[in-house]
Amino acid sequence: MTDNPMNQVKSFKSLLPEILFGVFIFTLGAVIAFNFNLGLAIFGATIGLLILFAALIRPRTAVFVALLISALSGAFVSQPISGIPISLSGVFTFFAIILGLTALISRPLSTATIKAIKLNFVFIVFAVYYGFRSLTGPTVVEGLRITLLIMTPVIIGVLASQEMFKRWKTRREVELGLMLIPIIPVSVLIINLIFNSLTTSAVGFKTTQLLSIGGRTLALLLLPILALYIARWRYTPGIVQKISYMIASLGLTSTVITSLSRTASVIMMAFIWPARFFKRFFSASTFAILILVASFFALWLSLPQVQARFFPTGIENFDLAKIKSIDTQGRTRLWTLTWNSAIEKPIFGHGGGFSKLLVREAYRLDHPHNEYLRVFADTGIVGVFLLLVAWGGRILHHFKKWRSAQKVHSRTAMYHFAALLTVGAVCLSFVTDNTLAYVFVTIPTFCIFSLADTSNDL
């Protein structure tokens, strides 16, 4: 299809409501974010509006901005603005959903849009249901905030699929954007290392002075990107490209291990890396690579910080039977509290935002460190069912497409393999984290889904 940026664009008159809404939202947001500093507010609003107009002309601009937001959010999570309780991550998320919605409604409903909505329909239903339950919950604002976080990546995913269905080059551009995401947070990490503003503890690293970034945050952000690099490494035919993707995969793996995030590291080691060699163990070259990778991991396990985090009693004293006694940092108490409250109203739950209110009163934390339990407590069995159908459906969809595509088209198989690794990693992370609310993880995740969904047309 020809790439005419004004193709099917509504007239200026019909776009006036979207433009006026964008002007109001970006101006108000800039004023609040910059603590009513008029000069900075005008500057911020101007930048936002320029991006908005670019997205109106070329909707795929919103997708690229969302990927940039993911990288920035992963690097500046919880960084306060102007001394007020608003983080850069929160501002970026709000900006992303407004930009994505505006870009979507700036075009007439097309076949590509309908197809993209169908592929993400259950996610939309889940988000709407969560929002509905938030209106009857004990904290409406918090419930709607979570609804916003759930809906943002879905909207970006629908927009990405729509643009990829219309223009095949967008696939490669989005993929490149995904693969470049680690540059920003890793650069922030290096800057903090240079200026000695990186602090380490038994649970990972965190920056304190220059730019805010946490080890677990970075590790979870890198999992979908690692899945894409692993898929590229497996299916790219050229030996030079294979080596480059292997090196990149090892680099991302090093960063995840260094973060000391046990959740991300276990998912990576027990799921993503073994899947890379699924049905490929009989090749001599593959065996050689396995030896190299094993040596690589052995090197990292020799570091004292890594040993203390993953093997607190020492590697030589490691006993598989003692897995159950591993310190879960108080998560079991959170899970018990959340479960006991959830079963009081098991069908429809207590309402969106209830779980946060519960654990905050009991332990002064923001979430129960288990997405399935949080959804159960907030929205009941109905919400859990929708959550499982949405994410479980993605697992089955990409697994079937991957298996069938391997016999026909390696590129299509590659994208579905990346999507399968990604959705599996995210679902596993739900067990100990509230990844559903981490848009810096879910936006790249849904963009990878879009790459796979549209690869069937290659």
Image (cartoon, rainbow, N blue to C red):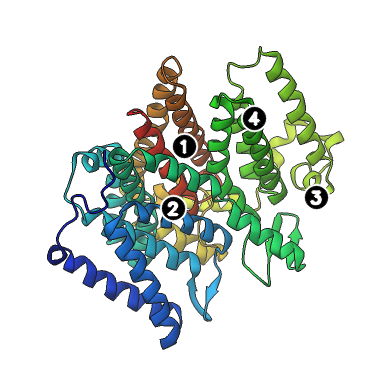
Looking at the image, is mark 4 or mark 3 earlier in the sequence? 4
Looking at the image, is mark 4 or mark 2 earlier in the sequence? 4
Q: Nearer the viewer, residue 216 or 195?
A: 195
Asked which secondary structure carries label 4, the reply is: helix
Label 3 crowding class (10 Å Cα cut-off): few <14, some 14-19, many 20+? Answer: some
The location of residue 361, given as percent across then percent down, is 50, 66
Residue placed under numbered mark 2 in the picture: 341
Q: How many marks?
A: 4
**296 sits left or right of 155 in the view:** right
Please say if the residues under marks 4 and 1 sit with CB atoms less than 8 Å apart: no
Please say if the residues under marks 1 and 2 sit with CB atoms less than 8 Å apart: no
The residues tagged by marks 4 and 3 sit, at their Cα atoms, a distance apart of 34 Å
Amino acid identity at mark 2: Ser
The location of residue 187, given as percent across then percent down, is 65, 58
Numbered tag placed on residue 423 in the rendering? 1
Amino acid identity at mark 4: Val
Looking at the image, is mark 4 or mark 1 earlier in the sequence? 4
Q: Residue at x 47, y 37 (%)?
A: 423
Residue placed under numbered mark 4 in the picture: 240
Asked which secondary structure carries label 3, the reply is: helix
Residue placed under numbered mark 3 in the picture: 305
Q: Is residue 343 visible?
A: no
**Would you place residue 387 above or below residue 100 in this image?**
above
Q: Quadrant of the C terminus?
A: top left
Asked which secondary structure carries label 2, the reply is: helix
